[in-house]
Amino acid sequence: MRVLVVEDEETLREQLAERLRAAGYAVDCAANGQDGEHIGLEYPIDAAIVDLGLPDKSGSSVIAAWRAGQKAFPVLILTARGRWEDKVAGLEIGADDYLVKPFHSEELLARLRALLRRAAGFSQSRIECGPLLLELGAKRVSVGGRELELTALEYKVLEYLMLHAGNVLSKSDLTEHIYEDDSERDSNVLEVIIGRLRRKLDPDRELNPIETIRGRGYRLRLARTSEEG
Ligand code: CA
């Protein structure tokens, strides 16, 4: 999952980025509204965290520009204590939730997870696809009750496949949601990760959970069984 942080206070921005990366997200950062607006419009962002008090333009106008550009990813706004007018303006313009500074990073992560789940149409923190069970909070995966040892990259790829179970995901779509940096993107790496996931998920080759769709990408073949509104 790829998260954009728009925050002009350098210390807070870097702390947030570090905390989010440690939690397994790919992170893009912007120090002002203009850059934030551009990244949100041009890159495949899954969620954004936006400080409303930015030096060049308001966070609300950044969100308004995204919504005008048909970008529907969830947005969590950060406000200074006492600035309730900003918060209302931000929510009216299309933000999904807010946090008042200062906040605990655990609170931010919990809100973010909730927004991402809601955006993906889940009310639960677990996704089941046939015998596969993925617990978003604990980042745990099991197959038929057998817990798997996955690397961070393997987990990210599987989580994205399971969130979009049944849909064909192109290699570039997958890599863009997993890596924040262009230089790291390499479809050979993705192929290796998919190969390892297949062996771990399906050591006896009975399940064939991840299909290769020739010329198009990959698809998790197992349907979601835990979908709730
Ligand atoms: Ca600020």
Image: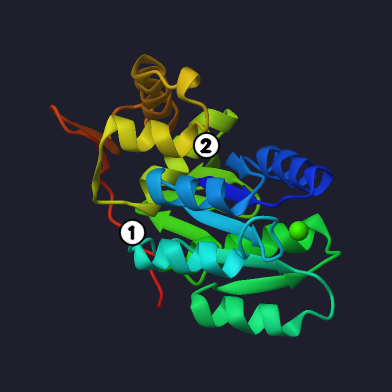
Place of residue 30 in the rendered image (x, y in percent of width and height, measured from the top left): 62, 44
Q: Is residue 184 above or below residue 141?
A: above
**Type of amino acid under label 1:** Arg
* 31 over 136 or under it: above or below: above
Q: Quadrant of the C terminus?
A: bottom left
Asked if residue 195 lies left or right of residue 155, the reply is left
In the structure shown, which secondary structural element does the residue marked by tag 2 occupy? helix
Give coordinates of residue 179: x percent, y percent: 50, 31
* 71 and 216: which is toward the camera: 71
Quarter residue 65 falls in: bottom left
* Structural crowding at the residue carrying mark 1, measured as other residues with C-alpha within 10 Å and reported as few (<14), some (14–19) or many (≥20): some
Residue 73: % across, % down: 44, 61
Examine the rendered structure and indicate whether residue 53 appears above or below residue 13. Answer: below
Residue 207 visible in the picture: no
Identify the residue shown where x is 52% and y is 60%: 126
Q: Which residue is mark 2?
A: 155
* Kind of residue at badge 2: Tyr
- Mark 2 vs mark 1: in front: 2
Q: Residue at x 13, y 28 (%)?
A: 214
For ligand 1, tell me if the residue under mark 2 lies within 8 Å: no
Q: Residue 35 appears at what percent x and percent y?
A: 55, 45
Reading the chain from its start, which is encountered first: label 2 or label 1?
A: 2
Q: Is residue 196 left or right of residue 141?
A: left
Badge 1 marks a residue whose secondary structure is loop
Q: Is residue 130 visible?
A: yes
Q: Residue at x 62, y 65 (%)?
A: 58
Residue beneath label 1, please? 224
Q: Nearer the viewer, residue 20 or 147?
A: 20
Q: CA distance from mark 2 to mark 1?
A: 17 Å
Neighbour tally class for label 2: few under 14, some 14-19, many 20 plus, Cα within 10 Å? many
Q: Is mark 1 within 8 Å of ligand 1?
A: no
Q: Residue at x 67, y 72 (%)?
A: 98
